[in-house]
Image (spheres, helix red, strand yellow):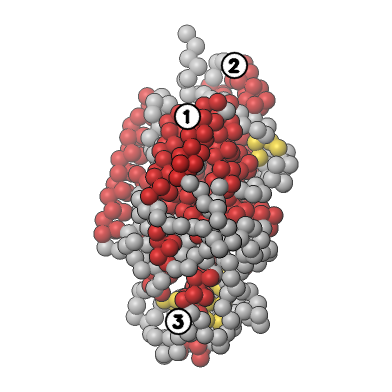
Amino acid sequence: MFNFNKTSLPFNDRYLNSRKKELEKARNDYRFNYNIIPPLAIVDGVPKFEYPKLKWIFLLIGVGARLIKNSIASKVDIKSKFSKFILPISFRVKMFIQILFYLFTNPTNFFISAGKYIVKFLKPGEGISLEEYNELFASIKIPTADRDFMTDENFVRMRLAGWNPSLIEKINLLPKNIAFTDKLLKEIDGFKNDSIAKLSKENRLFILDYKDLDNLKNGFQPNGEKFCYAPIAIFAKPKDSELLKVLAIQTGQDSNMFPIFTPKSDYWSWQMAKLVVNSADGNYHELITHLGLTHLVIEPFIVSTHRQLSSRHPIYKLLIPHFNGTIFINYLAKKALIAPGGGVDYLLSGTIESDTIVSIQNHLKRGFNELAFPNTLKQRKIENPEIISDYPYRDDGMLVWETIKSWVNDYARLYYNSNEDILNDEEIQLWAKEIASEQGGRVKDFGEDKKGKLTTINYLIEAITEIIFIASAGHSSVNFPQQGMMMYAPEVPLGLYDKAPLAKKKYSEADWISMMPTLDMASLQLNLGYTLGGVFYTSLGQYGNIFSKEVSPILQKFQTKLKEVEKTIEERNRNRFPYPYMLPSRLTQSINI
């Protein structure tokens, strides 16, 4: 009897006609559309296979219920002097029940409707003190409860173990557009006997440069103008110390327009400068690191995998669990979150039009091969622990990368005995070609020739490892900090509502507060961050019963290794600033939220 689930390569399958019919149907269900987010290759609509499972839906409902509980418990009166409107508790509950009704009567539009309700029923208000922002968190823990978020030490720590720890890089020379000098350096504690040249020569000089945000345009809704900045921050290691220190912040790219601030600047000027960096980092995270380099990277691979690989193909079986829910969540994002009047439009500093352009431009300029986790570390010249000794994102990430790669290597070599098998596999060749082609996935630099050529087992292993890593660890490590860190607006203001500080002007706490989002926007940031970081569905390495019996030993090896990695990271966390976002138990199998 024919076994429809039997794993086989096409040249070993006696029933090629059934494979071809299956793929014909898949190619009709999964079509590329280049007009949804031009010029990206996005799936046309939502194929039936991509709708979420009931378990995922109930997890999301649970998150919503906790947010309702927090909203009811909150004692903050977010009424503004401009408006007497406030959302009654009874109406909040009624709203939640109505959203649940949409779930069962019109599931396609349920999540879009829910997103619109969140925005429609914002409560106008202004922030006056940290206490007011803190009181938004009634039954939900404040992300900064266990740390002082205003210290320089915390500011540095967030670059290495925070919500967006993938940007800091070692440099040999300061960029010409930053006005930081040896005189300013020698004023900073620990650097009296140093020079910029000396720091560079001894591999002790680092930078955060948000130049990719320089094309953002100031947004204007819903509570007035929001201000966009593309700051530069300089860091260094003091002599005989492994701890990084922040040296300077220039709040924009043009040194003639934007002043330099250092830890020796006026206290509130310095706090405001750090707030500019954290805001830029939050915007960069959402537009580039999160959306552009995980969600948008994976979608073309999903479409081509369905179109070109039979469900009996071993690579199809390996990849499909890592694609679970991605197309659906991307569809929701396009319709409700990153659309005009959606959460991104309300929260982030830039206009939705300039946000979209920045995200797409940065996605397009990065080739597939350079997105491999080890390659991203090399590009930033921080792959060596001697450069930065305590870098949890790098160190834990490499443990997970090597574990995934070992699993993919063992799995691929069960089915491919030689490079000739790769060349003879018609489906995998069409898969690779379509992914890279202009008429297909438009994935830049995919393949050994950067044009979709696939000739070796080694490259296939590297490519599959990268896809799985981005879909699991890569996404999880930047998604779940949205709840764990980013939902607290005073630390990560996604929108800035006042201008950056000027030189030689004394500022106050009130000036610092005035830059932060109004309380209604802070509440939206809390709700959206808690939701996006609160749905944990599927776990890395838990595939169920989808594989053939011959896979069991190597799958067990993979799962055992993940447990060992978990223990290693837990031990590290006992002796450092805890970084939970690469724990295998905290990594979802796919991008499903």
Question: Callout 1: 10 Å neighbours few (<14), some, many (20+)?
Answer: few
Local SS, label 3: helix
Position of 430 with respect to 511 (left or right) is right
Tell me the tag on residue 267: 3
Rendered location of residue 255, percent (x, y): 63, 80
Vertical comparison of 284 with 548: above or below: below
Mark 3, Cα crowd under 10 Å, few <14 / some 14-19 / many 20+, is some
- Could you tell me how many numbered marks the image carries? 3
Quadrant assignment, res 398 = bottom left
> At label 2, which amino acid type do we have?
Ser
**Mark closer to the chain start, 2 or 3:** 2
Residue located beneath label 1 in the image? 53
Q: Position of residue 107 (x, y in %)?
A: 55, 29
Which of the pair 64/128 is nearer the observer?
Answer: 128
Q: Secondary structure at mark 1?
A: loop
User: Would you say residue 93 is visible in this rendering?
Assistant: yes
Q: CA distance from mark 2 to mark 1?
A: 28 Å
**Residue at figure coordinates x 64%, y 65% from the top left:** 225
The amino acid sitting under disc 1 is: Lys
| Kind of residue indicated by mark 3 | Tyr
Q: Residue at x 55, y 26 (%)?
A: 105
Q: Residue furthest front?
A: 84
Q: Of helix, strand and loop, which one carries label 2?
A: helix
